[in-house]
């Protein structure tokens, strides 16, 4: 059961993020939901690349017979963190522009103001 805990947490985080994206009307809460989904994907990548008893892949002379953790999921996660940060910053800048233009960050009010 404990071996599946990271994957259960991934499913929980994705459910929380989807709830925020689909059912919240505040644009900042929607951006937070997207960020939670991004974090769940990062957790999934790290949990998928975990090797029990594995050693870090930074050693150039690893002991014989030791299994190493794959570096690919770690590199993908670092890349995803950077892309997620840029995406979050862009979405928040859109929220600021929407607030300046419409005077509200409620998506229901913004949809009602279509011209």
Image (tube, rainbow, N blue to C red):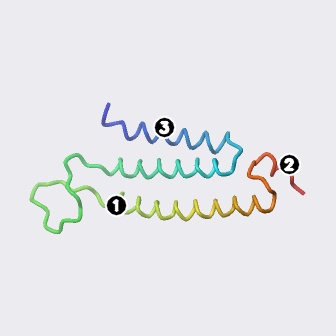
Q: CA distance from mark 2 to mark 3?
A: 33 Å
Residue for badge 1: 72
Is 19 on the left-hand or right-hand side of 57?
right
- Label 2 environment density (alpha carbons within 10 Å; few <14, some 14–19, many ≥20): few
Is 98 on the left-hand or right-hand side of 21?
right
Image point 86% across, 53% down: which residue? 113
Residue for badge 3: 12
Earlier along the polypeptide chain: callout 1 or callout 2?
1
Q: Position of residue 51 (x, y in %)?
A: 25, 49
Q: Quadrant of the C terminus?
A: bottom right
Q: Secondary structure at mark 1?
A: helix
Seen from the viewer's position, the closer of residues 36 and 76 is 36
Q: CA distance from mark 1 to mark 3?
A: 25 Å
Q: Secondary structure at mark 3?
A: helix
Residue for badge 2: 112
Image point 55% across, 65% down: which residue? 86
Seen from the viewer's position, the closer of residues 67 and 102 is 102
Q: Secondary structure at mark 2?
A: helix
Above-or-below relation of 93 to 33: below
Q: Residue furthest left?
A: 64
- Write down the quadrant of residue 70 in the picture: bottom left
Q: Position of residue 32 (x, y in %)?
A: 58, 50
Earlier along the polypeptide chain: callout 1 or callout 3?
3
Image point 43% across, 52% down: which residue? 42
Dots 2, 3 in contact, CB < 8 A: no
Is 38 on the left-hand or right-hand side of 94?
left
């Amino acid at each position: 059961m404990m071996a599946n805990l990271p994957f259960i947490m991934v499913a929980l985080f994705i459910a929380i993020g989807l709830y925020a994206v689909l059912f919240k009307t505040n644009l900042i809460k929607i951006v937070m939901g997207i960020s939670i989904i991004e974090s769940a994907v990062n957790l999934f990548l790290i949990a998928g690349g975990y090797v029990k008893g594995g050693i870090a892949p930074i050693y150039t002379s690893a002991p014989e017979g030791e299994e190493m953790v794959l570096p690919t999921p770690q590199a993908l996660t670092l890349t995803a963190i950077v892309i997620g940060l840029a995406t979050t910053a862009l979405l928040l800048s859109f929220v600021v522009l929407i607030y300046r233009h419409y005077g509200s960050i409620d998506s229901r009010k913004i949809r009602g103001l279509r011209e």
